[in-house]
């Protein structure tokens, strides 16, 4: 697999920005939930992927032979790893989507119809 490029990642962040703008326009809740769902998947969603990325970055820097072995660098690597754990803690956001979908389906006739269409 070829290495991703900075442009690949800019495209991904631009897509997230477009999603944010779209959600600010108050779309149908069924559509909004469907769009947000892949981002919050408990196994492949952004919190899990970003945590894995932070851990991999810390490992790449730490294990590279040209990396200076200084206390300051060690602190930075520890900060990356701490941030990774904090991101991992967000993996339960998919439950929030499930709860929101259930709540809306039970209180909104339009949401109930939309949830039956799946």
Image: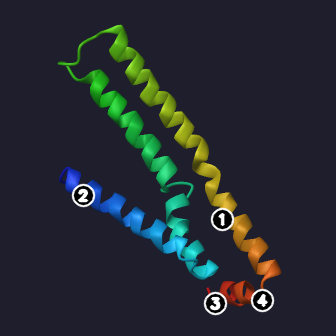
Q: CA distance from mark 4 to mark 1?
A: 18 Å
Q: Nearer the viewer, mark 4 or mark 1?
A: 4
Quadrant of the drawing holding the C terminus: bottom right
Identify the residue position indicated by label 2 in the image.
Answer: 8
Residue 43 lies left or right of residue 69; in this view the side is right
Q: Nearer the viewer, mark 4 or mark 3?
A: 4
Residue at 82%, 79% in the rendered image:
107
The residue to which callout 3 is attached is 117
Given residues 31 and 24, the one toward you in this image is 24
Answer yes or no: is residue 34 visible. yes
Residue at image position (36%, 66%) is 15
Mark before the other along the chain sequence, 1 or 3? 1
Query: Which image quadrant is residue 88 in?
Result: top right
Q: In the picture, residue 29 is in which quadrant?
A: bottom right
Q: Which residue is mark 4?
A: 109
Residue 72, image x, y percentages? 35, 13
Q: Please tell me which of labels 3 and 2 falls first in the chain.
A: 2
Q: How many neighbours does mark 3 have within 10 angstroms: few (below 14), some (14-19), or many (20 or more)?
A: few
Per the model, the C-alpha gap separating discs 1 and 3 is 17 Å
Of label 2 and label 4, which has the lower sequence position?
2
Q: Earlier in the sequence, mark 4 or mark 3?
A: 4
The Cα atoms of the two marked residues, 2 and 4, are separated by 41 Å
Residue beneath disc 1: 97
């Amino acid at each position: 697999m070829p290495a991703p490029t900075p442009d690949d990642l800019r495209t991904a962040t631009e897509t997230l920005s477009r999603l944010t703008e779209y959600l600010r326009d108050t779309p149908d809740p069924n559509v909004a939930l469907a769009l947000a769902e892949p981002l919050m998947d408990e196994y492949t969603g952004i919190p899990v992927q970003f945590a894995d990325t932070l851990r991999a970055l810390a490992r790449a820097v730490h294990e590279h032979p040209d990396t200076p072995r200084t206390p300051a660098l060690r602190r930075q690597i520890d900060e990356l790893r701490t941030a990774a754990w904090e991101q991992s803690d967000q993996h339960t956001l998919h439950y929030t989507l499930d709860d929101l979908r259930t709540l809306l389906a039970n209180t909104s006739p339009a949401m109930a119809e939309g949830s039956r269409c799946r």
